[in-house]
Image (spheres, grey):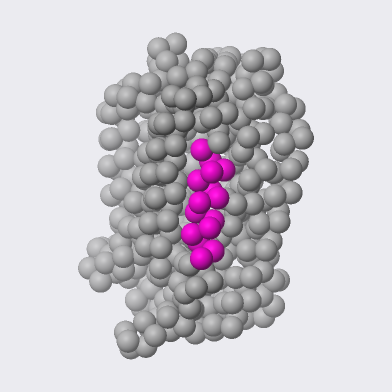
Amino acid sequence: MYDRHSSLMEGSIWKGMLTFALPIFLGNLLQQFYNAFDSWVVGHYIGGTALAAVSSSSSLIFMMLGFFNGVAMGGGIVIANLFGARQYEEMRKVIHTLILFGLTAGAFLTVFGVVFTPLILKWMGTPESVLPQSIRYFRFYSYGILFSVMYNVFVGILHAVGDSRHPLMFLMISSAINVVLDLLFVAVLKLGVGAAAAATTISQGISAMLCCLHLLRAKKESYGIRWRELRFHRKSLQSILRFGLPSGVQNSVIALANVVVQSNINAFDTAAIAGCGAYSKLEGFAFLPITCFTQALSTFVGQNLGAHQYDRVKKGVAFGIGCAVILAEVIGVFSYFFAPQLIGIFNSQADVVDFGTRHMRTICLFYCLLSLSHCIASIMRGAGKATVPMVTMLVCWCVIRVSYITIAVKIVPELETVSRAYPITWACSSVVFLIYFFKVDWIHNFDRIQARKA
């Protein structure tokens, strides 16, 4: 077997990380673009109520996908460590176990989403005027949720071995298809809000299929897949769950906390829901520098710790954190000054723009804190310490966030009160992460753990 995707373990650190992170950035940009394009098409061709319906479903979608995507993320860390250590036979077992896990999880989520959508949306306090379209949108999305799960599994495998170029190519194709189908289904054929979800489902299916075909054709690579090797290897599954369960639990509980936040937003009128929904799409674009560097950091740390290149890990960590934090804050300042124009892209109604602008300006100047928290959390996951970010984020982004909102909204029932929950809890997690990061010798502790295993 031979392997071409190993640039993160050799050569220039900053060139290797940027070369790996840039396709992730462009891929996430495309993914956010077609997610935002869904909202733009819905808001302009159907109306504010339909946009509110899409927005009210977003937190629920993340809650459902968060757990399984977190477990898949843990699988990617295991693969990166084994790839760095050149333990290819064990790596193949993890890959095939992870794929079978994804197929099982995707099937479960499809049934769950189709059956329980109305109940959960009602529990979230979705307004009656929005509820029918929210149910329609989320049910159509649920029909293809397996594709979303498997796409994340396949991309996680490719990223773990240092290949971020092929996922970008496949995402470019699916994004173009999504745009065409959105315009055809919603703007031309007038099929309604469910058609926007159907367009997303079809495009996600195509991207998952392309990733799968690429992995099937990679027969000479150590990470190539073969259907006959699909099975649950007990040791591999245990490794995936050990690394992934903390991230999965973290994602789910934080998503549940965000559902509570969305429920408080739902207590305002439809314009507030639509305005905050428009902001959430813009926020996805703003977080792209964070996302690309955090994914690069996890893979970089995982591979190089597996190869016992500890000085390289330290240098890469410093570079990744610096780039992500600076870029995030630059975007935050830009978002603050151009908030009305950005919100207006999705819906030009004055009250929608007003609510969205107020929400954005309360949050966006603190993107540097969110970036810092995510970077250190990704570094810890890459080092096999997924419990650290899980506990920190559960306490700060769930317990403190929900407690703050529960108390503060009763005292000051304004949208900005809800909005402040994000920067306050980001600041809390950043302080905790910094204390841990500088007080604990996590790199050499990893070395001792590896020595004991040997």
Q: Nearer the viewer, residue 29 or 453?
A: 453
Numbered range of the magenta stretch: 421-435
Give the percent coordinates (x, y) of residue 163.
56, 65
| Residue 37, quarter of picture | top right
Q: Nearer the viewer, residue 146 or 69?
A: 69
Q: Residue at x 65, y 40 (%)?
A: 364
- Dominant secondary-structure state across the stretch colored magenta: helix
Q: Is residue 145 magenta?
A: no
Give the percent coordinates (x, y) of residue 242.
31, 65
| Residue 350, quarter of picture | top right
Q: Residue at x 57, y 43 (%)?
A: 423
- Looking at the rendered structure, the number of numbered marks drawn on it comes to 0
Give the percent coordinates (x, y) of residue 119.
29, 24
For residue 402, side relative to residue 425 (left or right):
left
Q: Nearer the viewer, residue 168 or 286?
A: 286
For residue 316, side relative to residue 144 (left or right):
right
Q: Nearer the viewer, residue 396 or 292?
A: 396
Q: Residue furthest left?
A: 234
Residue 179 visible (yes or no): no
Q: Residue furthest top?
A: 129
Q: Work out whether 318 lies above or below 310.
A: above
Give the percent coordinates (x, y) of residue 158.
50, 63
Q: Residue at x 66, y 21 (%)?
A: 354
User: Which image quadrant: the C terminus?
Assistant: bottom left
Q: Residue at x 67, y 43 (%)?
A: 365
